[in-house]
Image (spheres, helix red, strand yellow):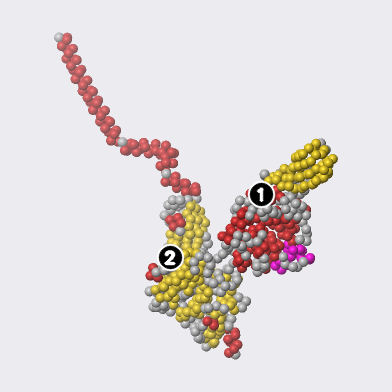
Amino acid sequence: MFIFLIVCFSVYAADINILTYRDDYNPLETFQAEVILDSEPASELTNLNFEFSKDSQIGILLFLEKISDKHYFVYFNIPDVNKGEYKFKVKNINVIENGILKRISAEKTVNVLEANSGFEYLLNHQNIDGSFGNVMETSLSSLALKNIDYEKAILGVNYLLNNQDPTGCYPKNNCNVRDTSFALLALSKFNQNYIKTKNWLKDAGNNFDLGLWNLKLEGNAVCGNIQLNGVYNLNIEDKETNITCNNAVDFTLTHNYLGNTHTIHQYSGNNFYYSIEDSGCYGSTYKSSCDYINSLYASWALDSINEDFPQQYLENNKLDNRTIDHSIGYILNNDNEDKDWLLNNYLNGYWSYSSASLSQTPDYFVSALSAYALRNEFLFEEAKNYLESRTQTSILNSGLILYLLFDDEMNLPSVSITPGISNKLRSFNLKIKNNKEPLNIFIEAPNSSRLPSEIYLQNEANYNVNVIESFDILINYGNFSYTIPVMAQNEEASESPLLPPPKDAIQFINEDVDIYLNIDESPSDELELINMWDFKINDITINVTGNLRDILEIEQDYFDSIESGETLRTSIILNKDKKPVYPIYEGYVIIKSSKNIFDSIKFSVNFEVGDYKQEESIDNNEETVTSDEEQSTTSEKTSSEKKRNLWWLWTIIILIIGVLIFIFFRKRKEVTQSFDDYAKKIKK
């Protein structure tokens, strides 16, 4: 019965909380985790209670720190393993609950992001001159390494540029269609000058109408209407040329295009006959006999730079039982018949050179082309996974597979730290080690730690850190970071997590807001946020960004804490003052704590254009209304206001008129009296 109880309860993983700041790591980086138990274990945890594994257990050097009876911190450097999902396990922990002994375990998925090992394979096979072998191999390998190691990829491109034939083709002094096609593909993707290479490849096809044809005749003979005495040059205007001479003549057929002259055919004799191919096909060399696969390569390269290719020739001469005809055919034309053929001849992750009925032998080169052609189909991931481990079979296969199927992979940095935590030490040595190319490291820590804020790390750096109080050391590099908890000696044991909560720990219940308002509208609502984490989070702040802060008022923008599963609410109001200055207000409402930024809501508040203009008219009432009302209102306003405001002027005018009248009549009276007196005097 006792054994039954142990086995029965061994599946309960909810009793163990495994907290990590990161889920994605590169090989040799430092994995950090906190283990918090719901119940106190029957005995202290040891290294035997932890495991790192994939299909089987993988050896690690694990460091274990006990924070409290139910709280542990572990860290270790991830071994140099391949890309994939791994498991960090906490196992076989005995706890007693209600008098019952339980053995509990839990696990956490860890993603290792290492780039495909084929990239390293290519780098190891690059020659001193930058090449990876022949032109085709160098072109594909350079394309494959473009996002992984650009400097090495450019070395390959420079090799191509330095070994280009004067006419633009490849390889120098021995040009062929295949190598020139892949060189054109590489040069165009690296934004190099590919004009001469493109022109050579276009001219190399069997096309009568492109360029000029000339037949040189040397000798002494009569050839139809031509009296030959020495050398005669005949411009060829027909695809078929048939000339008969009475004596032997040396014939040389040449083609001229953009200043380049190529000898096509030479013959000595009396009768010269030549038919110029005009299907647009490509041979192995310049204007040689049609070869379908070389025509495919040339067409793929030309199509990648939006140039015409012999589509009709490819359609008319396709072999039904050869895979490459349908893979590149589907890339070029997106023809459903090619798609159906590829789907029908798929063999559990790969394709053979021929149809499945003729061969089941994997061909990695055509499999890469076929998988790329079907990159939007359901079987793409399976084919990609199959080819992922086939990138070290040859330079050619590796280059094509990596270029077509793994072009999204990057050369990621790898930095490790020691220790992953400082647990109640007065001082400790912090070692930051770079496992790859030199890079910049940014450090955030209190001034008392005396740590630099930025370093250029080539190999490793060591710093002695004095601990006066508890704090965190944040180390950033590229898109990755570490948080190292530093616990002072007086720090009390706690079951609260030391590492920052994940970025999705607190989430808004509200959705993004896109709203249209009148200028006199002032809506209100509630912001709701919930703690999705299993632990309490302290110091919650709500911030507003952009010009949104000018019109959004939050009732409470700070909370001491939020418990696990708890929902907090606070009221918000938009456009409280009803005086918007702009027609559009945008920004984010962000939740953050002292250790992390969590969720955000985007706000876009648009004030109705008509109302916004109306507000401007209201503000400019004396400008717009004056045009109407100042002609009506102003006429009334001015008349009434002038009557009120100019009364004193009228008073003065009336007084002046009164005085003038008084003076006038007074003077008139005086003159009349004098005149009467004067008249009386005369009569007398």
> Compared with residue 96, is residue 288 higher up or lower down, i.e. above or below?
above
Q: CA–CA distance between discs 1 and 2?
A: 55 Å
Across and down, in percent, residue 569 comes to 46, 66
State the residue position of label 1: 167
Q: How many marks?
A: 2
Is there any visible trace of residue 598 in the rendered image?
no
User: What crowding class fits label 2: few (fewer than 14 Cα within 10 Å), some (14-19), or many (20 or more)?
Assistant: few
Q: Is residue 140 left or right of residue 357?
A: left
- Foreground residue, 272 or 323? 272
Tags 1 and 2 touching, CB below 8 Å: no
Q: Is residue 680 left or right of residue 347?
A: left
At 57% across and 77% down in the image, what residue appears?
A: 52
- Foreground residue, 65 or 189? 189
Question: Residue 453 has which mark?
Answer: 2
Q: Which residues are magenta?
A: 342-358
Q: Quadrant of the N terminus?
A: bottom right
Q: Main secondary structure of the magenta part?
A: loop
